[in-house]
Amino acid sequence: QVQLVESGGGLVQPGGSLRLSCAASGNIFSINAMGWYRQAPEKLRELVAVITGDGTTNYADSVKGRFTISRDNAKNTVYLQMNSLKPEDTAVYSCNADRIGYRRGSYLYTSNNVWGQGTQVTVSS
């Protein structure tokens, strides 16, 4: 099986920075698009940023110019560099992979719409 594990969340003051990481584990041979989502209390989950397998990126308007998504395919890891953080960025951040190909024994499998467990980001003075 495969799983995504996020790290890097925490408490930061307004204007500060954090870097989130999301590592995929398992005997993986391919990952398509990966993205970061967030959900604040009493709000719907929203897409923050996405990066395709060839490196094309897309961002929510609210984070453009402040957040940068990147990936290291050799490490099966996606990152979210968050700068100039605002209190309204406070949320649980989760990563997602739309399709992961992995090996188990002699067979190849695909796992779709894989989610990490989420990491809390709190921006407060």
Image (cartoon, helix red, strand yellow):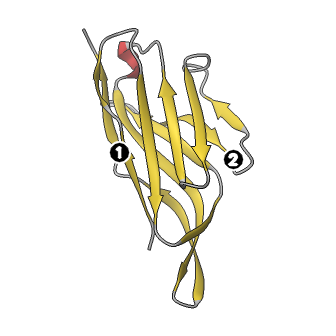
Q: Residue at x 51, y 73 (%)?
A: 27
Q: Position of residue 60 (x, y in %)?
A: 59, 27
Categorize mark 1 by other alpha carbons within 10 Å: few (<14), some (14-19), many (20+): many
Q: Is residue 89 left or right of residue 42?
A: right
Q: Position of residue 59 (x, y in %)?
A: 62, 29
Taking the view exactly as shown, the residue that stands out farthest to the front is 74
Q: Find disc 2 in the rendering and name its residue.
A: 52
Q: Position of residue 33 (x, y in %)?
A: 64, 51
Q: Residue at x 62, y 53 (%)?
A: 73
Q: Say if 103 sits above or below 19 in the image.
A: below
Taking the view exactly as shown, the residue that stands out farthest to the bottom is 106
- Compare residues 90 and 21 and report the one nearer the observer: 21
Amino acid at pointer 2: Thr
Q: Is residue 9 left or right of residue 103?
A: left
Q: Which mark is residue 93?
A: none
Q: Which mark is residue 118?
A: 1
